[in-house]
Image (cartoon, grey):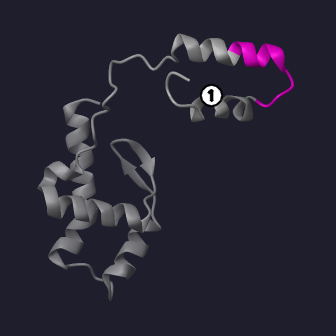
């Protein structure tokens, strides 16, 4: 995500929490404001979205703690890294599927991921 998109997103988030910060919302309570804001769909820099009251409260918390920087979307920590399975996981999946072709994959792979590394 480029920096302009991240900034636009942070400013959009700020626009939703600003009435809470300045206590300028026209509803009787902050809770009513959150409910009203959450009932709408917004055209955002990231597409059309709806937000839960808890999301907006989280933005408010982040802003109070980190300022506008807290409202910027996070940069993925795995950006540019391969998300492929390790070879031993691929081998396990293939051999399990070949040995029990009718078994549901999700249930079959769970034991592999519950194992401790090296076992």
Residue 13 x %, y %: 27, 55
Q: Nearer the viewer, residue 69 or 97?
A: 97
Instruction: State the image quarter where residue 25 is shown.
Output: bottom left
Q: Seen from this angle, which residue lies furthest left?
A: 67
User: Which quadrant holds the N terminus?
Assistant: top left
Q: Nearer the viewer, residue 113 or 84?
A: 113
- Which residue occupies 39% across, 81% down? 32
Please tell me whether residue 12 belongs to the stretch shown in magenta.
no
Left or right of 110 on screen, residue 54:
left
Q: Seen from this angle, which residue lies furthest front?
A: 119
**On screen, residue 67 above or below 96:** below
Instruction: State the image quarter where residue 6 is shown.
Output: top left
Residue 38 x %, y %: 43, 66
Residue 30 x %, y %: 31, 80
- Which residue occupies 35% across, 77% down? 33
**On screen, residue 45 above or below 55:** above
Q: How many marks?
A: 1
Left or right of 81 on screen, residue 39:
right
Q: Secondary structure at mark 1?
A: helix
Q: Which residue range is magenta in the image?
A: 94-104
Please tell me whether residue 96 belongs to the stretch shown in magenta.
yes
**On screen, residue 37 above or below 2:** below
Instruction: State the image quarter where residue 82 is shown.
Output: top left
- The residue at which mark 1 appears reads as 112
- Which residue occupies 14% across, 53% down? 68
**On screen, residue 30 above or below 113:** below
Q: Nearer the viewer, residue 15 or 52?
A: 52
Left or right of 92 on screen, residue 80:
left
């Amino acid at each position: 995500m480029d920096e302009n998109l991240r900034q636009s997103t942070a400013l959009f988030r700020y626009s939703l929490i600003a009435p809470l910060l300045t206590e300028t919302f026209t509803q009787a309570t902050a809770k009513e404001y959150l409910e009203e804001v959450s009932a709408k769909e917004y055209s955002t820099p990231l597409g059309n979205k709806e937000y839960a009251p808890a999301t907006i409260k989280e933005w408010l918390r982040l802003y109070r703690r980190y300022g506008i920087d807290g409202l910027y979307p996070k940069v993925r920590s795995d950006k540019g890294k391969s998300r492929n399975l390790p070879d031993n996981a691929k081998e396990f999946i293939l051999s399990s599927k070949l040995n029990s072709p009718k078994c549901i994959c999700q249930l079959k792979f769970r034991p592999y991921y519950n194992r401790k590394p090296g076992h």
